[in-house]
Amino acid sequence: MEAARVIAAVARITRDVGRAEELAQDALVSALEQWPQTGVPDNPGAWLMTAAKHRAIDVLRRNKRLKRKQQEIGRQAEARQSETPDWDTALDDEIGDNMLSLIFTACHPALSMEARVALTLRLVGGLTTDEIARAFLAPETTIAQRIVRAKRTLTEEKVPFETPRGPDLGPRLSSVLEVLYLIFNEGYTATAGQDWMRPALCDEALRLGRVLAELAPNEPEVHGLVALMEIQASRIHARTGPDGEPILLLEQNRARWDQLLIRRGLAALKRAEDLGSAGGPYVLQAAIAACHARAVTAADTDWHQIAALYQRLSDMTGSPIVELNRAVAVAMADGPQAGLEIVDTLQDALADYHLLPSVRGDLLSNLGRHQEAATEFERAAAMTHNEREKRLLLKRAGK
């Protein structure tokens, strides 16, 4: 529970997240050795923090190249040695800054996206290597190597342990949000394997998003992403049937949507909008999700509003996937032929994307062109790597 805070504080001293994680683990080992004899301290988090910081100072003392830094840290440590942080209060400035720096470091653009995801879940999320491997259906050795290489890259590139400021903040914040969004989406609709969803990944991304929102309260896109994840997560229990089979949005029992998460999502969206932003991509996606959340039944959905929001999002991002989503909204608002005309302009851009033939099959089916629709569903089934989704598509193809 205290791991991320301890790692963040020690990384502030050592400027090396790999070494910081090792020192935090050393402190835990020391606790496991001492506490059975001395008893668990009243404030175990503060005990671990102090133990890890002392180890960090010892490392600096042994490092001649960092002699001056050692003296500075040593003086600070001696001045604070008798202090016991109040861990029952909200995140104070120092802890908040350390945690924010840890998140930005783990999501640094110097790392590949796969490495950023693995390192974030390991250092900030506290997941074990085995847990990350199981979540992404990857060998544990692959994830372990990915994490080791990520730490080495951060050290070799001399990536500073800090929260970027000024003009550097925007691109780096985008990287952090992209990592959290990718983790959530992998949980919401798994790209491969036997399960339609992996809710534990959704939970972890949402937890980290909430932490980030408290650490960066004036960033509308942070609140937009949290709003999007809260509202999307509200549907999780309605997205599968008794045997784990997928249930599509318009067929879901909305009584099973989590109203607490919806309220939290709408509040986060309002918080983003109150910051005065015209709306970035995450705020716009959250606004789309809110349209669905506010509709008591599928028939109540304001598809014209959703299509308009997707148009804004498409103009902003230029993403063909956003255009595909806009096509669905246009089809619902103005008829399947209008949607199909948009889809057919995306054939080249999304040639390898399985949802394009899936959407096209749905629109053809609604137009009564059932044989053509079946061919599209079969093509989509051949392209997906998720077994649950493949069965659904083949069922729609009449197979």
Image: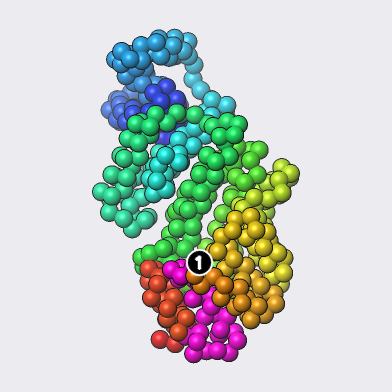
Res. 312 image quadrant: bottom right
Is residue 284 or residue 231 the one in the foreground?
Answer: 284
Residue under the point 41% across and 63% down? 191
In the rendered image of this protein, does residue 374 appear above or below residue 291? below
Helix, strand or loop at label 1? It is loop
Residue under the point 49% across and 57% down? 185
Q: Is the image coloured rainbow, by chain, by secondary structure, or in one colour?
A: rainbow
Q: Give the image location of residue 23, x and y in percent.
A: 33, 27
Q: Which residue is mark 1?
A: 349
Q: Amino acid at mark 1?
A: Ala
Q: Residues within 10 Å of mark 1 (few under 14, many from 20)?
A: few
Q: Give the image location of residue 54, x and y in percent.
A: 37, 18
Is any part of residue 44 visible from this angle? Answer: no
Is any part of residue 184 visible from this angle? Answer: yes
Q: Main secondary structure of the magenta part?
A: helix
Q: Which residues are magenta?
A: 350-374
Res. 314 image quadrant: bottom right
